[in-house]
Image (spheres, rainbow, N blue to C red):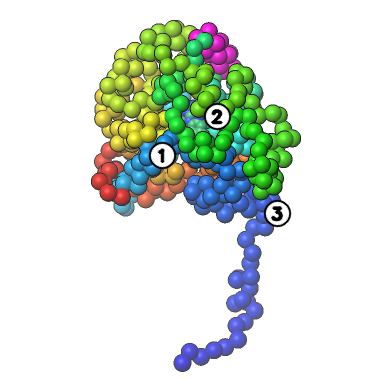
Amino acid sequence: MTRRRLPRPSEVRPYLRTGPIRLSPVERRLASAATIWDLRKAARRHVPRAVFDYTDGAAETETSLRRSREAYARIEFVPSVLRDVSSIDLSTTILGRPSAMPLVFAPTGFTRLMHAEGEPAVTRVAGRLGIPYALSTLGTTSPEAVALASPETDRWFQLYLWSDRDAGLDLVRRAQAAGFSALVLTVDTPVAGARLRDVHNGFTIPPTLSLRTLVDMGLHPGWWFDKLTTDPLQFAVFTETGGTVADLINRVFDPTVTIADFGWLRDAWKGPLVIKGIQTVDDARAVVDAGADAIVISNHGGRQLDRAPTPLEQLPAIAAAVGDRAEVFVDGGIMNGADVIAAVAMGARAALVGRAYLYGLMAGGERGVERAGELLRKEAVRTMQLLGVRSVAELGPERVRLRSTP
Ligand SMILES: Cc1cc2nc3c(=O)[nH]c(=O)nc-3n(C[C@H](O)[C@H](O)[C@H](O)COP(=O)(O)O)c2cc1C
């Protein structure tokens, strides 16, 4: 039988030490999030259901998004052991500029819906992380205000072309004048995808007051208080509102856009031109032939064509086809810094994330975006260390295999 004794006070003391005391509920919420999935959980509790679903959701059966995430689960890393991995360098060059890691905050429309701090918070965090941030045409903060919020951030401007080409041109000039370094033309949105969660939730822009909205106010008073006591939530560069986001896209955007539009855009924009929403080798070749400096292999986070090609699976063939003439980026389904490392090993210059930082934004505003960035960075560093790879340049296709099952 085990003999018992009374512990000495000195033996008990170490167990009584408390962790850092965090008075702010936001800080507590963020500190307990150990992954982007945890931030997603916190976000879900913290914002109205329709806001969470608008961000988290995808088109139709959401198969595109599910497959994008599953593809990262099928990654098998190939490590080398017995390397000195005490110091890891994640830095790289993106569109000719230094970046602290191969990561870009993707353009997301209506960002102040997720949290009143919105785009200025995201651009400031990108600046602190030393990575680029792309502001959306559907942003809720103007290009000038985003520039002012963090002049040192490498800012890209994401453009949708709508029927009024002059308005598009005007926007391009404004972005240039405000010091944005790259133009990102999104080409996977000739019409809106069917975001069924928005339809089921009756989600409209601006949000309409219904009995459900009123009940929701009681459940998420913090979000509503922020909304009602800060600048009104509206698109920063045009005044079209009313109906669902899909209604709005369909009214404003132009399904007649073709590769012929590159000509005038190329002339109008002085910096790098990035084409976002490329999904096949043929389209990658066509846009690079037409003068694109970079492409984003993307299905819009699964929010447009459902059952679309899975970006990570398309990456090796597209990088092989155009990688010597253009920078190749990839996005969709990235929820971990290890996914970023996998994407780079498979041929991407950098990966973009949308929801990963938006979950942080919904969970805790600017501090939440910072937490998301910090998690992605730490996960990326740890993955490199465990892989036995010290720098981004050492990350090659020999480091990853894509299994047929998870
Ligand atoms: C809420 C939300 C809004 C988005 N708005 C835009 C947009 O305005 N323009 C655009 O090019 N892409 C937009 N995207 C797509 C992102 O730029 C990116 O392609 C996608 O989020 C990547 O997938 P991930 O969210 O799994 O990282 C949006 C994505 C989300 C989640």
Q: Is residue 255 left or right of residue 320?
A: right
Identify the residue shown where x is 41% and y is 13%: 256
Q: CA distance from mark 1 to mark 2?
A: 18 Å
Q: Amino acid at mark 2?
A: Thr
The quarter holding residue 121 reads top right
Residue that carries the numbered disc 3 in the rendered image: 23
For residue 196, say whether it is visible.
yes
Identify the residue shown where x is 60% and y is 71%: 15
Mark whose residue sits in front, 3 or 1:
1
Q: Amino acid at mark 1?
A: Glu
The quarter holding residue 278 reads top left
Identify the residue shown where x is 34% and y is 21%: 326
Residue 62 - label: 1
Q: Answer with mark 3 or mark 1, whichever residue precedes in sequence.
A: 3
Q: Amino acid at mark 3?
A: Leu
Q: Please rate how many residues cluster around mark 3, counting C-alpha atoms within 10 Å: few if below 14, some from 14 to 19, many from 20.
A: few
Q: Answer with mark 2 or mark 3, whichever residue precedes in sequence.
A: 3
Whether ligand 1 has any atom under 8 Å from the Cβ at mark 3 is answered as no
Q: CA distance from mark 2 to mark 3?
A: 39 Å
Residue that carries the numbered disc 2 in the rendered image: 244
- For this orientation, the residue located farthest to the bottom is 1
Dot 1: what SS? Answer: loop
